[in-house]
Amino acid sequence: MAITSSDIEYHVAGVRYAGLLYDDDQRGHDRPGVLVAPAAMGLGPNAKAVAHRLAELGYVAFAMDYYGDGASPPHDVRAPRLNALRADVDKARAIGLEALRVLTSRPQTDPDRVAAIGHCYGGALALELARAGADLKAVVAFHAELATPRPKDAQAIRGKVLAIIGSEDPLVPRADRTAFEQEMTDGGIDWRLYVLGGVGHSYTNPSVLPGGEPGMAYNAAADRRSWIAMLDLLREVFDDPSRNAGDVALSRGR
């Protein structure tokens, strides 16, 4: 097994974006692809680690960039860019769709077997890609904000949806959960919402330590459970390249 990573740039409205493609180049072509949308910190170690792990399991994984230049910008730069994306769903969807095009255009990727996953804002972006009608077999959102300015667009979702949040996540109030459930139901979507009891925001990020910002902390058990739930869904929608994907994940303590 030889996991390689390749920098790939793409452009939207004159802005250069740069993502990382992770792949085991010994596994051949026509394999399922997974678009990885990073958390609000941007394309940093966590998103890269997730994409690398997916590549180890046989997927072609593209860790996308939505800030520009493939960077994880400092907070004073990142915050206004993130707020601008949240306020402009068309722009966010356009960036995500172009990143998805990068993934599906690779010769090793089967364009008919593609999923999108994301953490924090990346999870919200993955959901918006689905609402935009992207040809995704599955979408998985980890500790993502569930609210959308266009709930009726759920009718355009073409794949299965899994959202996994903590019951104590300050960014996802109970009203948003209820609205999400109604949105998915009204759209006729095959959906599931897993609520992890006693868990807050950023539960998949080991760098978020308890005692920092209220309601935000890494939770190893929640991280492991949500990863396995994602792999179960990927196995469900794909002819999975690794029958023992869940066992591999567990063996690494995730």
Image (cartoon, helix red, strand yellow):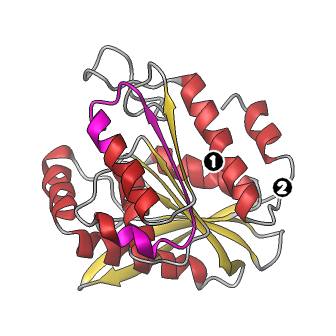
Compared across the picture, whether 85 is left or right of 198 comes to: left
Q: Nearer the viewer, residue 4 or 80?
A: 80
Give coordinates of residue 186: x percent, y percent.
41, 62
What quarter of the picture does the C terminus occupy?
top right
From the image, tell me which residue sits under label 2: 242
Amino acid marked by disc 1? Met
Identify the residue at the far right of this view. 243
What quarter of the picture does the N terminus occupy?
bottom right
Compared across the picture, whether 94 is left or right of 229 comes to: left
Quarter of the rendering containing residue 92: bottom left
Identify the residue at the far top of this view. 211
Q: Which residues are magenta?
A: 153-176
Amino acid marked by disc 2? Ser
Residue positioned 65% across, 42% down in the render = 229
Q: How many marks?
A: 2
Q: Secondary structure at mark 1?
A: helix
Check residue 159 for magenta coloring. yes
Q: Residues within 10 Å of mark 2 (few under 14, many from 20)?
A: some
Q: Nearer the viewer, residue 163 or 118?
A: 163
Residue positioned 50% across, 65% down in the render = 188
Can you tell which of label 1 and label 2 is closer to the viewer? 1
From the image, tell me which residue sits under label 1: 230
Give coordinates of residue 190: x percent, y percent.
57, 59
Give coordinates of residue 65: x percent, y percent.
38, 65
Quarter of the rendering containing residue 33: bottom right
Tell me which numbered mark, 1 or 2, is placed earlier along the sequence.
Answer: 1
Residue 50, visible in the rendered structure:
yes
Q: Nearer the viewer, residue 150 or 61?
A: 150
Residue 41, visible in the rendered structure:
no
182 is higher (above) or lower (below) than 104: above
